[in-house]
Amino acid sequence: LFLLSSFTFTSSSSALSTPTSTIPLHTTSSSTSTSISNMPPPIVYTIAGSDSGGGAGIQADLHAMRAMGCHGCSAITCLTAQSSTGVTGVHSPPTEFLRLQLDTLLEDLKPRAIKIGMLASRALALEVGDFLRDLLEAQGEDLQGRQEKPFVVLDPVMISTSGHKLIQDDAKAAMIQNVFPFVDIATPNKFEAEELLGRKLNTPQEVEQGARDILNMGVKSVLIKGGHSLAEGNDGNSDGAAGDLAMQADINGTIGYAQDYFLSSEPPLDAEGLERICDGCRGVWLRSKRYDCVHTHGTGCTLSSVIASALAIGHQQRSIGIGSESEGGNTGTRTGTGTGAARSIYTVDACVLAKAYVTAGVANGVGLGQGPGPVVHTCFPKSSRHFPHVALDPLRGPSEGFLKMKSAVVCSQESEQEQEGVTLGKLLPIVDNAEWLEQLTSTKGITDIQLRIKGETDPEKILALVKTCQEICHRDGVRLWINDFWKAAVQAGCFGVHVGQEDLTRCVDEGGLEEIQKNGLALGISTHSYAELAAAFGVRPSYISLGPVFGTKSKNVAFDPQGLATVRKWRELIGSDIPLVAIGGINDAERAREVKGAGADCVAVIGAVKKDDVGTAIKELENAMS
């Protein structure tokens, strides 16, 4: 099979407890089960073959779905007699029986996502295509725009580990013609993509063009998995002279990394069409550490099943209300447990989570029999160790990163000899004018402040205001962060720049990251979703912020409130080496204390410091964050 990536885990047995215990980001307390006891797990179908050895096929699918907190239902396309050493027999039930399985399930257990595995015959591909057409047409008439249709994930299993074709050409043609039009994302590995395209993919540019060509076949999105070096043939060796040439161009990008390429025909999420670097319409390289482990049986099945499960979670979360006010809702009148990051799981986010899950499974793979062992099934990703990064250039190693900062918590745990470098303050007030900034810089306890300029587009006026504010901050010994306007920040010699995801894209496209880094400025990045977190990791900023934690009126945001559960999840995924800043709706010391307890190192505040007695307000916030 095809080496993928690595994802973190606790133990394989933990994934076999209750489904809800693996997705704590959806709970409303630190308990892993009590708060969502009345919310059933999302239902996910797997339409695939059975692996009697338990490592791949529907067995792997159901393991992965349960580990992700979903309920898996199966419709079996074929039965295999196999172990870790190989397949000794295959039996295919009549296609009519496959349809009976699916229709029976559909009458009672309606899916939020469907994963499709190997369709070995033309008849199977036609039957599955007919089922998807009937399902989605019926759903469309029933829903009438009230709810999303189920997501469809296709793992086009066509090539064996040894490089042998597993399906005939007429089955492949039927799959393309009858199944592809209903597919939200296809997940071919390098060799399967080559089989679909009828040509080799030996360079990143060829992979990118291959993805575009697969989209033209009818699927909405594609993830071309790249656990192997691009220069490898499907026998695991360099592909002759062409492979040697490809290796020269590819060696920095694929040796040591597992890189997958995601491309989508879907537009950006932003209502104005502004792009993020994690938006599939731009093309996204997802990178994780490569593990040369032989225990990779079932990686492709597992990856596609986790993608389907993650999409089902997002589907369910968007169908329920936003959580209570204490957990992030802005009305406090609804009892649902939806949170911003969970409600924002779309295709690229699902790919990020799946890559994290499989990477952990490969990293911890163990042999069970005489042959290669299966990928280890873990839980919803909960560590930075195996979480992927968005690689801006697949041929280059990771970025050197920006000015490294410490949180006050980390600094307090270090010895005097270790306490070097810059410590981020516990409070980050956000202001929009020089007058308010000057009042805060003269107040005890403020070490960092951010200027967010609203409504001004004239570069000269922006630069003049930034310079004025920098002079004030320099005089009072306060570090000034500029929101979005990185050019003015560089020219004025400010301490740092903070960018949102759309402004990060513009900064990347304009060469701004290199300028900010060259001039020694710190960089903070906003995140709201799992894909945005992967994008931030790829840049290696000074801090990462998450928001809005609670409902807020200070800024028109496209994401729902995150809630304290997502703060806890971000703390798990980021690790202690990068400070976590919480922002949005933190209007008083009590809320600051709550986000501190959830794992935030710093709170970005607006209204919380706009008090008659500013000094007292800041002291209360400081105490809450201590």
Image: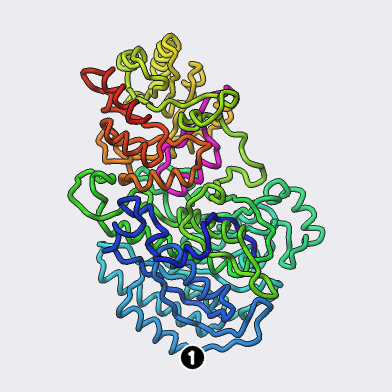
Any magenta on residue 138? no
Q: Secondary structure at mark 1?
A: loop
Any magenta on residue 523? yes
The residue furthest top is: 475
Q: Which of 134 and 473 lies nearest the eye of the viewer?
A: 473
Residue that appears at 77% across and 57% down: 243
Q: Which residues are magenta?
A: 518-545
Task: Name the amino acid type tagged 1.
Answer: Pro
Q: Quadrant of the C terminus?
A: top left
The residue furthest right is: 241
Query: What x and y, as percent, mark residue 394?
Result: 63, 47
Query: What x and y, as percent, mark residue 23?
Result: 40, 57
Residue identified by numbered label 1: 94
Query: What x and y, as percent, mark residue 97?
Result: 44, 89
Location of residue 91 by image quarter: bottom right
Can the viewer see residue 283 in this picture?
Answer: yes
Q: Quadrant of the N terminus?
A: bottom right
Q: Is 477 rendered above or below residue 618? A: above
Q: Which of 109 and 176 lies nearest the eye of the viewer?
A: 109
Residue that appears at 68% across and 61% down: 293
Residue that appears at 58% across and 34% down: 401
Can the viewer see residue 216 in this picture?
Answer: no
Query: What x and y, as percent, mark residue 248?
Result: 77, 49
